[in-house]
């Protein structure tokens, strides 16, 4: 793996030096292989089978890189990752270049990438709508005119409200390690998570202003969006 900071920590070293309850819960929620398989299936549904295998693809908020693994297994050969956390990127064990960078100030040139992907990162932004607007403008700047933006984020639906209710049940949490892990993650990201879920109209309006919709779906607690620069 190419890491722009030159860091070379293992997963065990990262967690032992800087134990993070959210990270520990995330690792309990699903295995890396389960997440990679989930990402592969999701990307196929969002049209990945139609993308050229030599498309220049960047996954923003790539974290430990399971989305990069999914893209590589789907046959894409020019994949890069971006995340603000060097500790998370250090956990990636693959061949795709990874960069420590702020999504509000991307290090790529104008109109230089074919596809940008975000899978569950925008709801971690601290200040809405300001941070989101900066990020959207940067994504639009970096994409080529015929490029694709692919977004998958949590969304407040009846199903997600039900899940939140179950997460508050201590008995259910004791019976399900996965549910307990999810409840723990929500607990530690509550401020940004609830901020994101409480602003659906401004979020949709912002993307509608800067991108033309190719596909849009809301269901089962997720919002999926594919668009081209407007």
Image (spheres, grey):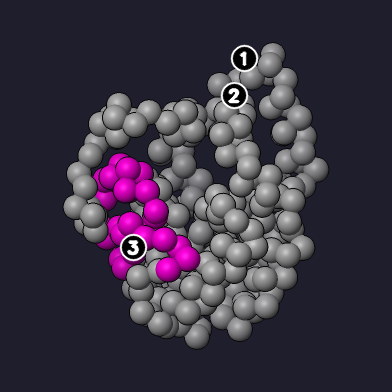
**Tag 1 residue:** 174
Q: Nearer the viewer, residue 177 or 37?
A: 177
Q: CA distance from mark 3 to mark 1?
A: 39 Å
Q: Which mark is residue 80?
A: 3
Do tag 3 and tag 2 residues touch (Cβ < 8 Å)?
A: no
* Residue at position x 45%, y 71% in the image: 115
Part of the protein shown in magenta: 77-105
The answer to whether 27 appears left or right of 151 in the picture is: left
In the image, residue 73 sits, relative to residue 176, either above or below, namely: below
Helix or strand or loop: what does disc 3 sit on? strand
Q: Secondary structure at mark 1?
A: helix
How far apart are labels 2 and 1 at the CA level? 7 Å
- Does the magenta portion include 87? yes
Residue 27 visible in the snapshot: no
Q: Which residue is mark 2?
A: 180
The label number, if any, that marks residue 5 in the structure image: none
Judged from this view, the residue extending furthest toward the right is: 158
Which residue does the image show at 77% across and 63% down from the upper left? 201
Image point 55% across, 54% down: which residue? 125
For this rendering, which residue is in front, 153 or 101?
A: 101
Of residues 17 and 70, the one nearer the viewer is: 17
Q: Closer to the N terminus: mark 3 or mark 1?
A: 3
Q: SS class of the residue under badge 2?
A: helix
Residue 77 image point, x, y percent: 30, 66
């Amino acid at each position: 793996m190419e890491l722009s900071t030159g860091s070379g920590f293992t997963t065990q070293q990262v967690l032992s030096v800087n134990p993070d309850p959210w990270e520990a819960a995330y690792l309990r929620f699903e295995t890396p292989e389960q997440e990679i398989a989930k990402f592969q299936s999701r990307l196929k549904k969002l049209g990945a089978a139609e993308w050229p295998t030599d498309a220049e693809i960047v996954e923003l908020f790539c974290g430990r890189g399971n989305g990069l693994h999914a893209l590589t297994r789907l046959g894409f050969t020019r994949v890069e990752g971006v995340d603000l956390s060097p500790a998370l990127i250090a956990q990636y064990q693959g061949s795709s270049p990874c960069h420590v960078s702020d999504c509000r100030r991307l290090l790529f040139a104008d109109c230089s990438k074919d596809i940008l992907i975000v899978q569950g990162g925008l709801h971690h932004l601290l200040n809405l709508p300001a941070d989101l607007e900066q990020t959207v403008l940067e994504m639009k700047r970096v994409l080529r005119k015929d490029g694709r933006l692919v977004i998958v984020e949590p969304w407040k639906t009846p199903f997600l409200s039900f899940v939140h209710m179950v997460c508050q049940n201590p008995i259910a949490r004791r019976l399900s390690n996965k549910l307990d892990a999810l409840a723990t993650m929500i607990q530690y990201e509550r401020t940004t998570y609830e901020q994101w879920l409480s602003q659906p109209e401004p979020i949709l309006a912002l993307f509608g202003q800067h991108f033309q919709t190719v596909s849009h779906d809301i269901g089962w607690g997720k919002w999926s969006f594919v668009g081209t620069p407007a």
